[in-house]
Image: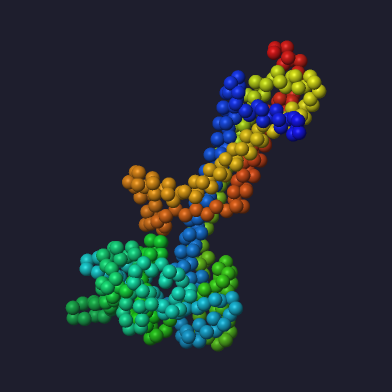
Amino acid sequence: MRQPYELSIAVRYLRTRSAHSFISFISAVSMIGIALAVAVLIVVLSVMNGFENELQQRILGMVSDAQIIGYEGATLTDWREARERVLDRDDVEAVAPYVEGLAMAAHGEALAGVTVRGVDPSLESSVSTIDKVMTSGDFDSLESRSFNVVIGSQLAKLLGVGVGDEIGLYLAEGRMTIAGFLPRHRTFTVAGIFDAGMYEYDRGLVFVSFDDAAKLFSTDGEATGLRLAIPDVYNASEVVRAAAGQLIDEGFAQKYWLEDWTRVHYTFFRSIQLQKTMLFVILSLVVAVAAFNIVSTLMMVVRDKRGDIAILRSVGTTQRSVMTLFATQGTLIGVIGTLLGVLLALLFCWQLGNIVDFLQWLFGVDLLSAEVYYLDNLPTQVRPLEVAQIGGLALALAVAATLYPSLSAARQPPAEALRYE
C-alpha cells in the first residue's frame, strides 16, 4: 500500500458496510455534529462582523470622521481661515463647515424632534455620503436663502410629506408677546429625501443650507463646527487633536471641543466587540461538545474491533501504530466535519439575506425592525482569519478527543481479546 497502512485501515473503518453500519452511522453523526457547530460559529461571527462593518460605514457616512466644535456651544470665529489651515494638513482629506441645532419638525398634526444641520452641498459631499443615499430630489438644491430642506425617509413617512411639500421647523427659543410665548419657526420646502439605511438618521436628521441654518439659529454667519474627512479613520483621534493644537498655536484664541467617531460611538462599538467575544466563547463550547462526541464514537469502534486489534498486535504491530490508527480515524472525522461546516457556513452566509426575507414572508413578521436594530437588512462579512481560527480550534479539539480512545486501544492485551473471538 502506498499510503501508511494505519491510514488505510482508518479509512476502511469509516466506510459503510452492512455488518458495521451502526459504527459508520455514529461516525457520520459525529461529523455532522462538528459541521453544524463550526457552521453556526462562523455564521454568527460573520453576521456580527457584517453588522459592525455596515454600521461603521453608515455612521461614518453621516457623522464624518472627526469634528472641531466651538467650546460649550460657542460658534467658531473666523471659521473660513481655520478651515484653510486645517485643510493644508497632509493627514486631512477634506473639511466642511456646518451649523447644527435642535428643532421640532411639524406638518399638520404630525410632530417630530429633529437635528437640523446647515451645510454647503458642494463641501458636504466631500466629508459624508449624503449625496449617494438620496432617493428623490436633489441635495444640491440647498442653496442660500432657498429655505429648502432635505429629510430622511422615515421622517417623511412620519410627517406624511414628499418632495414639494412644506414643513415647519420650530425652535425652543422665542419671544414673549401679548398672546404668550411664541417659538421661533420657519417654513421650509422639502427638496429631497434620503435613505441612509439607519433609522436614527432617517428619522431624526434634516439638512438645510448653511446660510439658512445660520439665520435660523442666529449665528451671524458663523459655523458651529468643522467636519473633517481623514484618510486613516483609525487615526482620527490623533489627527483632530493635532489639527486643533495647530490652530491654537497659530493664533486662533479659542477653546475647541473635539470629537471623532471612535469617541462618540465608543460604547456602541465596544459593546459589539464584547458580544462577539462572549458569543465566540459560548459557541466554542458547542464545538467542544461536538468534537468530544468523537470519544464515544471511537470507544465503540475500539470495542467492536478488539479482534482486529489483537490480530494486528500478534503479527507485530506496535502500540504506537495502534494509537496512530484510531487517532487517524478520529482526526478524519474532525477534518471532514470541519470542512463540511466551513462549506455550509459560506453557503448560508451567501444566501442569508434571501433566507431572512423568506422567513419574514412565511411567518408574516418583521425580524429586522429598523427601529430596534438600526439596520433594515442582515449583512454578513466572512473574515478568512476567523474561519481559519475556528477550523483550527475544531481540529485541535477533535485530535484531543482521540487521545483516550487511542491509548485505550493500544493497551488492550492481545491474548485476552483473542480468547473470546
Asked whether, in this view, residue 251 is left or right of residue 72, the answer is right
Residue 349 screen position, x and y as percent? 50, 49
Asked whether, in this view, residue 320 is left or right of residue 170, the answer is right
- Location of residue 391 (image quadrant): top right
Residue at x 32%, y 65% (from the top left corner): 155
Residue at x 29%, y 71% (from the top left corner): 163
Is 142 above or below relative to 415? below
Total tally of numbered discs in the picture: 0
Asked whether, in this view, residue 146 is left or right of residue 226, the answer is left
Front position in the image: 35 or 37: 35
Give the residue at the far front of this rendering. Answer: 2
Residue 2 screen position, x and y as percent? 76, 33
Is 11 above or below relative to 67? above
Residue at x 35%, y 47% (from the top left corner): 361
Quadrant that contains the N terminus: top right
Front position in the image: 140 or 278: 140
- State the colouring used for the structure image: rainbow
Front position in the image: 242 or 187: 187
Residue 45 screen position, x and y as percent? 53, 50
Asked whether residue 250 is in view, the answer is: yes
Is 196 above or below relative to 295? below
- Location of residue 411 (image quadrant): top right
Give the residue at the far left of this rendering. Answer: 179
